[in-house]
Image (cartoon, grey):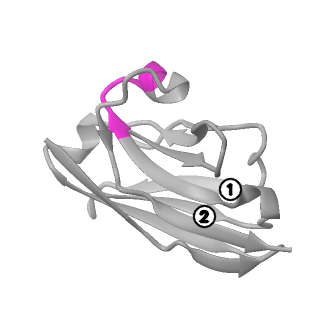
């Protein structure tokens, strides 16, 4: 079992920045690919970013490339999402996810573990 707890959400003006954190506990953190997803009201959950087990590779949705950065600190069992140049369309609940398989995270096909979510609201 892996428990994921997100933090760092909040209200920010357009153009501002936020850093989300996801602290993991339970089984070996480095066994898991970590990802961030988001779900806006009335919309389906969508992939935002993912990072490999030892952080050599990162992956981003086109909508956030160049603005968001995912990184992990394996010593702290934590994955982060640095969000810059935020836009109102980034408003959503952001979820942290963990799975042993990269393709599962990239395609959101049965991810093993999810956090409870943290709200990000970007005002115009």
Instruction: Categorize mark 1 by other alpha carbons within 10 Å: few (<14), some (14-19), many (20+).
Output: many
Residue 39 placement (x, y as % from top left)? 59, 47
Residue 3 badge: none
* Left or right for 66, reference 107: right
Reply yes or no: does residue 103 show up in magenta: yes
Residue drawn 42% across and 55% down?
A: 72
Q: Secondary structure at mark 1?
A: strand
Q: Is residue 90 magenta?
A: no
Residue 16, how many percent across, how many down?
76, 77
In the rendering, at what x and y percent does residue 13 appear? 78, 79
Q: Secondary structure at mark 2?
A: strand
Q: Are marks 2 and 1 in contact (CB under 8 Å)?
A: yes
Question: Looking at the image, is mark 2 or mark 1 earlier in the sequence?
Answer: 1
Residue 26 placement, left or right of 70: left
14 lies left or right of 29: right
Residue found at the far front of this picture:
42
**Residue interval drawn in magenta:** 98-104
Q: Residue 69: image x %, image y %?
A: 63, 55
Q: Residue at x 65, y 79 (%)?
A: 11
Q: Is residue 51 above or below residue 91?
A: above
- Which label number is shown at residue 68? 1
Q: In the image shown, does 109 or 42 lie closer to the viewer? A: 42
Question: Based on the displayed image, in which of its 4 quarters is residue 83 positioned?
Answer: bottom right
Quadrant showing the C terminus: bottom right
Q: CA distance from mark 2 to mark 1?
A: 5 Å
Q: Which mark is residue 82?
A: 2
Q: How busy is the neighbourhood of tag 2: few (under 14 within 10 Å), some, or many (20 plus)?
A: some
């Amino acid at each position: 079992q892996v428990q994921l707890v997100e933090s760092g959400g909040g209200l920010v003006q357009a153009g501002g920045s936020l850093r989300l954190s996801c602290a993991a506990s339970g089984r070996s953190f480095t066994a898991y690919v970590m990802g961030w997803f988001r779900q806006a009201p009335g919309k389906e959950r969508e992939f935002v970013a993912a990072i490999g087990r030892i952080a050599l590779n990162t992956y981003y949705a086109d909508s956030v490339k160049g603005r968001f950065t995912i990184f992990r600190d394996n010593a702290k069992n934590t994955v982060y999402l640095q969000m810059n140049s935020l836009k109102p369309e980034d408003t959503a609940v952001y979820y942290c996810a963990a799975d042993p398989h990269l393709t599962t995270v990239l395609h959101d096909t049965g991810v093993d573990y999810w956090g409870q979510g943290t709200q990000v609201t970007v005002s115009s």
